[in-house]
Amino acid sequence: HDDLLDIDTIETCIQKRRTLRGDIKIAVTAPENLDIGMPFTLSYGALPAASYLENFGFLPSKSAARRASAAVEIRFELDPQDRFLDDKRDIYQSNSEKNGEQPLLDDGLDFCLVGSEPDPDYLRFARLKFLGGTDAFLLEPIFAKEIWDFLDLPISRENEFAALTALADECRAIRDALSSDDDEEAKTSSTSVNEQKDDDATFLPLLSQLRNIELTALENTLNWIDVEINSLDTKEYYQERRLKELGLDTEWCAEDQGAQWSGTRTPGGVDW
């Protein structure tokens, strides 16, 4: 079946790759003895549509699986010319290992656009990638244990704009490539399956369908980015959040001196 999103039954078999007499085979094994007549169920997993087609030769047909697979794989990398490259690499490396994720082997992040809002890991990585200027102080060792959590939320208007713009540029580049003249030819050939061999008659329509799935994911993400960019002035950034934590988020006037401290602010209690 497409994946476990569509059914209530539990997966009852396991797929493993084995070598038999020098040949690689796929073995499907039940984890326990099953009664005669009991069905085997195997989940392919909630994968991007391209992975379904590449690995299994089909695209999900059920609605929940189709929604989950409507994705585009994108890769972003740290700038090798960034003067803070070593600091950013160390931050990403240490925090990915701490969270039990695959250790960083290079300076890039592969992720999938699913639906409209991008993977939170992308936003955190992009904020780290574009951290600089007046925000670069967050790369200081004193923030080493906190910065990964800081990156869950917008750091500054400039940093957030750069992260969103970079994603938008990449989405447009992929969209334009999918909509190029070469793809138009592929789209035409997929409608003329009677002139193709049997394998092409099955595969070309799937490629056309995959293209449409990925274009939809890209357009949805671009629409989401437009909304986010238009609301940049309404977002709360690191400095505002930090001032609130310190109780320094209200204006000070001379009349208040010695009378009352605002919020949670206490004399001498400032911890930057």
Image (spheres, rainbow, N blue to C red):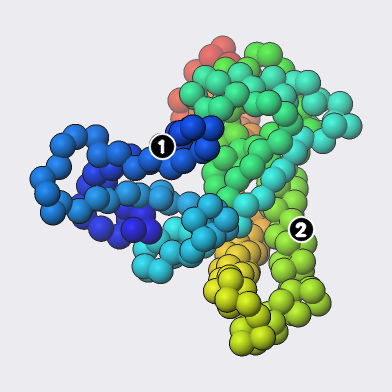
Q: CA distance from mark 2 to mark 1?
A: 40 Å
Which percent across, then down, holds residue 80?
85, 32
Q: Report the mark closest to the observer, 2 or 1.
A: 1
Question: Position of 93 compared to 67: left or right?
Answer: right
| SS label for mark 1 | strand
State which quarter of the image contains the C terminus: top right
Where residue 136 sits, quadrant-wise, is: top right
State which quarter of the image contains the N terminus: bottom left
Note whether residue 186 is visible. yes
Question: Position of 82 compared to 33: left or right?
Answer: right
Circle 2 packing at 10 Å, graded few (<14), some (14-19), many (20+), is few
Which percent across, then down, holds residue 176?
76, 69
Using the image as rendered, state which of residue 252 and residue 223 is in the foreground.
223
Mark before the other along the chain sequence, 2 or 1? 1
Which amino acid lies under the numbered mark 2 shown in the image of this protein?
Asp
Which percent across, then down, holds residue 114?
52, 56
Q: Which numbered dot is residue 16? A: 1
Circle 2 is placed at which residue position? 169
Q: Is residue 141 above or below residue 8?
A: above
Q: Is residue 182 above or below residue 16?
A: below
Which percent across, then down, holds residue 81?
89, 32
Which amino acid lies under the numbered mark 1 shown in the image of this protein?
Lys
Residue at 70% of width from left, 60% of height from top?
171
| SS label for mark 2 | helix
